[in-house]
Image (cartoon, rainbow, N blue to C red):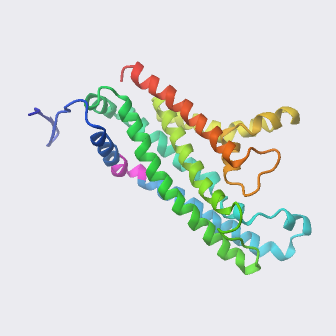
């Protein structure tokens, strides 16, 4: 029987070492739902998705009678409903950083790797639990944002439906994009071990770098821009991609590749350095 250790007034059993995969997953689930940052970050992401769907859809519907033929021709009702993704990605990405960065900041990571000396199961369990929870919630939120937005647009008879070609894929693609950005944040948090540095890096990757790329000469910009994480994600949420964009499948593959590379580097960093 393990010897209890004392922390304040409460006692906890000492780590037994090398927990089963089921035990590691259960532990990571407890950590995830017990963090206040989890609740607030995910609620913020949902609020941004649905709130901006209402805001942008209402704005378009109210201005529709005054829009010219050119603006009407380029109107995309699905995109209007998904405009909240732009800010929701920050909430999800920051949460991805915090679920590992917080452990490095408090020293809790030492208890985690003491219980699982091989270390890698801790990282994979975090990614799996966080990814499944985020994907499920963002899928519901994306569908809700779409339906609310289309309900508002229907006042001008300019709405679309989930049954229209490419629409369901685009809506679920938004949920996939947000989940992958969260996992990218998790990878950066593991690599950098500092929440502020990892969040800054994530913001630079998804927001700042695209702005800088737009300053390049057009020939360079067109070749570089489509391979950025944000551009790849945009193609996942587009009903009919343009020639300048990747296909939805290619965009998803590019973004998954970014996450996989970050995960590999994170795994090397977690196993190769002291905690």
Viewer-side residue, 16 vs 11: 16
Viewer-side residue, 158 vs 53: 158
Q: Is residue 188 above or below residue 244?
A: above
Q: Quadrant of residue 211?
A: top right
Q: In the displayed structure, does residue 240 sit left or right of residue 262?
A: right
Say which residue appears at 71% left-offset and 71% top-offset.
160
Q: Is residue 96 above or below residue 114?
A: below
Q: Quadrant of residue 267?
A: top left
Q: Main secondary structure of the magenta part?
A: helix
The magenta stretch spans which residues? 32-38
Q: In the displayed structure, does residue 25 sit left or right of residue 204?
A: left
Say which residue appears at 48% left-offset and 56% top-offset.
136
Q: Is residue 45 above or below residue 233?
A: below
Q: Residue furthest left?
A: 1
Instruction: List x then y, in percent, for residue 86.
Output: 64, 52
Q: Quadrant of residue 79?
A: bottom right
The C terminus: image quadrant: top left
The N terminus: image quadrant: top left
Q: Is residue 89 visible?
A: yes
């Amino acid at each position: 029987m393990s010897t209890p250790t004392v922390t304040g007034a409460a006692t906890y059993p000492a780590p037994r070492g090398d927990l089963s995969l089921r035990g590691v997953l259960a532990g990571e689930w407890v950590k995830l739902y017990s963090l206040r940052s989890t609740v607030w970050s995910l609620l913020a992401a949902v609020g941004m998705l649905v709130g901006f769907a209402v805001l942008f859809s209402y704005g378009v519907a109210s201005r529709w009678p005054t829009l010219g033929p050119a603006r009407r021709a380029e109107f995309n009702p699905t995109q209007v409903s998904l405009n909240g993704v732009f800010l929701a990605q920050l909430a999800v990405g920051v949460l991805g950083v915090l679920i590992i960065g917080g452990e490095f900041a408090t020293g809790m990571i030492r208890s985690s790797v003491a219980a699982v000396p091989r270390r890698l199961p801790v990282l994979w369990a975090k990614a799996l639990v966080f990814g499944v929870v985020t994907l499920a919630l963002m899928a519901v939120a994306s569908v809700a944002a779409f339906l609310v937005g289309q309900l508002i647009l229907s006042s001008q008879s300019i709405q679309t439906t989930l049954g229209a070609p490419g629409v369901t894929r685009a809506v679920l693609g938004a949920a996939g994009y947000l989940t992958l950005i969260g996992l990218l944040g998790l990878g950066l948090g593991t690599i950098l071990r500092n929440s502020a540095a990892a969040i800054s890096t994530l913001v630079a990757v998804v927001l700042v770098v695209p702005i800088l790329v737009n300053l390049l000469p057009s020939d360079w910009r067109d070749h570089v821009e489509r391979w950025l994480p944000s551009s790849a994600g945009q193609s996942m949420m587009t009903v009919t991609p343009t020639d300048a964009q990747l296909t939805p499948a290619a965009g998803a593959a590019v973004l998954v590749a970014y996450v996989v590379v970050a995960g590999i580097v994170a795994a090397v960093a977690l196993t190769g350095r002291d905690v």
